[in-house]
Structures are given as structure tokens and as C-alpha cells.
Amino acid sequence: MSPLPTPKTQWGEGPIWHKESLYYVDIEGHQVLRYTPSTNHVKTWPTGERVGTVVPRGSTGLVIAGASGFAFLDEVTGEIRPIGDPEADIDHTRFNDGKCDPAGRFWAGTIDLNSPRQPVASLYCLDPELTFSTKLKGVTNSNGLAWTSDTKTFYYIDTPRKNVLAFDYDLDTGTITNERIAFDTSSLSGNPDGMTIDSDDNLWIAFCRAGTIRCINPRTGSVLQEIVVPNDDNVTACAFGGEDLGDLYITSGEHLYVTRPGATGVPAYTFGG
């Protein structure tokens, strides 16, 4: 597997497929990128700060979350319009990974930037009315998120816990309850990072520092498939894309990759506001 012909990033993350292109972020490079496979064209938008995640809006444009909280990003002009920052009073956290839920709410969590890191971060939800709420406290390094096809279960990764959490999810209210460990990953090499879900409700998780994407059945915890990225330990996240959602795009610290693992993804949800 060789890197795609895209610019090197300083820390690539958060891939999401939308309208024949892959969007992702360069956290340390302070930019959002859009890669269009049909032309190998890459469009970039500077953010002026660390940006942890990007999602498309249902109407037009993008929503990002970074060091200054939630904001709109205009794809045409590059203008950034702040929405709000639930941690404006904390100077040692920033937003990390995020995704939209089936109802069009934008979920994104923060990470403690101190060393050693402490569980002072949180998982938040920005609803289409542009108000945000706290969904989970005591987080250290908020990462992968996914919802099952029946919308009844929400999966979540707080990396230092070395497991994947499961919650009962209410589509109408966006409420999560009944926190539990879906499966433990402490016996696997690397740290669980970004995550996506396929059409069979299996989870595809990037294990940073191990250079490996693992497909795991969350009902049993069994590893169904492993994809090793040669000579690149710093894989960070993955997302299905392509015309048939059968291409698996993989971000790493510096590179973007694609492979066909024999599974099919599901369309990404967009922000309803």
C-alpha cells in the first residue's frame, strides 16, 4: 500500500466521504483538506489554529471544531464564522475527533493537552439550533464515534481507556444512557483512535502507533480483519468512500492511503444546521 498523491500533513485526522470527495483535517498544519479521487485534486482551507474535525452541512459548507470551539467554514470564500466554545474557560484543551449523528447533530469531544493528560475533557453535541450540550465528562482523549444502522447504539472511544464504550442511543432526543464496555482492546498493539462503521455494523478502528486498521465485531469483540499500513505506525482514522462506499481511506500523521477491504461503508451523516 502506497500513499496517495496528496500533500504531506503534520497530523492528518478525521476523514469523511461526502459528494465524491474525501474531507479530512491536518491538526498541526492548521488546515482542512478535500481530496477528489477522480482528479487527484486537493483543496485546502487554512484554519489559523489546530482543527480536530470537519463535517459537511446538509445545506452548504462545512462545520469544524478546533482550539476555539465550533465554527462554520465556507468552502467558497474560506471564511470561518464562530459558533461557540463550551470550554472557552479552559486553556489546556482543544477539540479532537467528531461526527454527525443520524439526526444531524454534530458530536465532538476534546482532549487534554497537558502532559501527563488528565480526564478533564468532555464529549459535546452541537444541535441544528446551534446550542451545545455536554454528553460525557471525565474524558482524556476523545476519539472515534459511530452509530449502528438501527440507531439504537452509540460507540465511543476515549483512547487511554483502551476499550470501546457502548451506549443506548435515543434518536429523537440525542440522549445516551447505559454506559458499558463493548469490548476491550488492551491486548492489541497500538492505541484505539479514529473509527468508522460498515454496513454490517462492524467497527473499523485505527490503532495509532501500530500502523494497523482492525475490523472488530462489537457484539463479540473478535477481530475479523487486520490491515497493516507498511512503514507508517501513525495511522489515525479511517472512512469508507468511493462510488460504492467500498474504498477504505486511511489517514496517518503524514499520509493518506486507500484500500479495498471487501466491506461496504454507510453514507456519512451531515449537520442539520
Image (tube, rainbow, N blue to C red):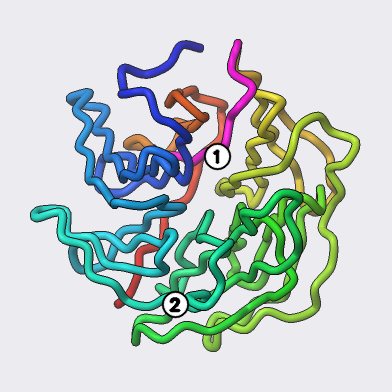
Q: Which residue is drawn at the image coordinates 44% and 70% (left, top)?
A: 106
For residue 126, which numbered disc appears in the image? 2
In the depicted view, which residue is nearer to us: 233 or 20?
A: 233
**Disc 1 secondary structure class:** strand
In the depicted view, which residue is nearer to us: 39 or 47?
A: 47
The residue positioned farthest toward the left in the image shown: 77
Percent position of residue 197, x then y: 58, 49
Q: Which residue is drawn at the image coordinates 80% and 78% (left, top)?
A: 178
Give the Cα distance between marks 1 and 2. Answer: 22 Å
Q: Which residues are magenta?
A: 231-240
Percent position of residue 82, x then y: 29, 72
CA neighbours of label 2 inside 10 A, class few (<14), some (14 to 19), many (20+): many
Query: Which residue bears the numbered disc 1?
Result: 237
Which amino acid type is marked by label 2?
Answer: Leu
Percent position of residue 185, x then y: 83, 43
Q: Quadrant of residue 5?
A: top left
Percent position of residue 55, x then y: 36, 58
The residue positioned farthest toward the right in the image shown: 187
In the rendered image, residue 239 lying in the magenta stretch gets the answer yes
In the depicted view, which residue is nearer to us: 257 or 158?
A: 158
